[in-house]
Amino acid sequence: MDMNLFSIFITVALAHFLALLSPGPDFVLIVKSSLKHGGKKSIGVATGIASANAVYISLCLVGVGTILASSVAIMIALKIAGGLFLIYLAFMALKAKKSSYIDLPISNAEHETSKTTFTKEMLTGFMSGILNPKNLLFYLSLFSVVLTADVSLSFKLALGAWMTLVVFLWDVAIIYFLSTSKVRSKFSKAAYYVDKVTGVVLGMIGMTIVKSALAK
């Protein structure tokens, strides 16, 4: 790898990781799932979010992302759908009864009795990621700045694969941190309130997104 490509890789990788550090709907969803369902099933959320990112990365790399972003109707529809999905998640969190949080399981074995499944969590994560227009716009703006026509397709694919992997590993790291017995033992008693707070946050984000989309 020559110095120019190395410089591009470092620039993109650094900007991408800094963006991951900024909490958003995906981060809130990861926290909510890991506290309520533990590590194994919550990896489904991480897989779904990473898959959604991979879709947007691929679209941007082949140029479709530019077409989508330039369509006002598509972006408004995407924002409304994403906002409504977050509002739905908020509603489900806020309507849950306190009794369902009593004796929240701490061990991984006990998590297996949870009503949710890996597939359901994966679908939730994917929908959260794919209905977040900021993901598309972020990758589009990032790639348009650093990826020129001189950059080979193989390098673009490698860069896309790297970013998808980093998204997945970062989310998994958060999940396992929150799923350790020591951390969960502290959070389990407050899980009901944590879930309500995340519900409020998701709801506010969702309403803000829908409001901004309708205003246009």
Image (cartoon, rainbow, N blue to C red):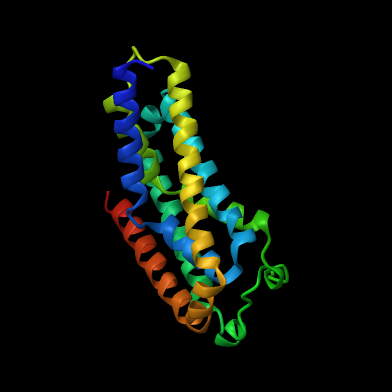
In the picture, measured across the screen, residue 176 lies left or right of residue 80, that is right
The residue under the point 26% across, 27% down is 145
Q: Position of residue 141 (x, y in %)?
A: 30, 33
Q: Is residue 56 above or below residue 180?
A: above
The residue that appears at 45% across and 64% down in the rendered structure is 87
Can I make out residue 167 in this image?
A: yes
Q: Quadrant of residue 111?
A: bottom right
* 105 shown above or below 78: below
Q: Which quadrant of the figure has residue 42?
A: bottom right
Left or right placement of residue 137 versus residue 155 in this view: left
Give the image location of residue 113, x and y in percent. 73, 71
In this view, which residue lies farthest toward the top?
150
Q: x and y percent of residue 161 in the render?
A: 50, 32
Let me know if residue 126 appears in the view.
Answer: no
Q: Residue at x 31, y 39 (%)?
A: 14
Could you say which is closer to the camera, residue 74 or residue 58? 58
Position in image of residue 166 (x %, y %)? 46, 42
**What residue sits 50% from the left and 47% below the top?**
169
Q: Quadrant of the N terminus?
A: top left
72 w.r.t. 178: above or below: above
**Total marks drawn?**
0
